[in-house]
Image (cartoon, rainbow, N blue to C red):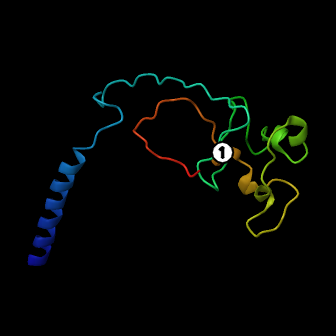
Amino acid sequence: MKKSIVTLTIASMALVFSGAAISGVKSLRGGEDIEAMAKKPIKAKPMVVEGGIERNYKIQPPLIPHKIDKEKINLKINTCLKCHSEKTYKKKKAPKIGDSHYIDRNGKVLKTVSRRRYFCNQCHAPQTNASPLVQNVFEGAK
């Protein structure tokens, strides 16, 4: 009985102190009331970078240096392959899909893109010139 009362007291004190710590957290919405209607976000324009975007670390997936809003990637079609496939990359003057994308999880080399690498925008992302939401002092490896 005493043990459960002590445990309950400690738990309630932890809740009080954690609430005090959480109340000091600032929201990304700034001073806006949580019940207020959200403002329509500014749609940032995608960056178009001739020659690609430099990587920040050695094994970083390449960033997409062009618009992708009209590209389709679903179970039946992947329009990225129109430019980046083994057959078309030279003609389109685009980077070829990495050899790792043709290897399945068992290490077997495939003739087509592996299903686990088929959805390009899981790893590769387009970029914009948007202002960061929070301060960032990250410096990539050179």
Q: Residue at x 29, y 39 (%)?
A: 26
Q: How many marks?
A: 1
In the current view of this chain or complex, which residue is farthest to the left?
2
The front one of 32 and 66 is 66
The kind of residue on which mark 1 rests is His
**6 versus 47 height, above or below:** below
**Along the line of sight, which residue is nearer the eye, 66 or 36?**
66
Q: Nearer the viewer, residue 18 or 137?
A: 137
Quarter assignment of residue 48: top right
Residue positioned 30% across, 31% down in the render: 34
Residue 29, position in %: x, y?
35, 32
For this view, does 55 lie left or right of residue 29? right
Q: Is residue 119 above or below residue 46?
A: below
Task: In this rendered view, identify the residue nearer to me: 32 or 34.
Answer: 32
Location of mark 1 (residue): 124
x and y percentages locating residue 108 in the rendered image: 82, 68
Q: Is residue 122 left or right of residue 136?
A: right
Above or below — where is 15 with respect to 92? below
Residue 40 is left or right of residue 91, and the answer is: left
Q: Residue 134: in sight, yes or no? A: yes
Question: Label 1 crowding class (10 Å Cα cut-off): few <14, some 14-19, many 20+?
Answer: some
Q: Residue at x 22, y 44 (%)?
A: 24
Provide residue 1's location: percent of width, then percent of height: 10, 77
Residue 1 appears in the rendering: no
Q: Residue at x 30, y 27 (%)?
A: 32
Q: Position of residue 128 (x, y in %)?
A: 58, 31
Residue 80 relative to residue 57: left or right: right
- For label 1, the SS is loop
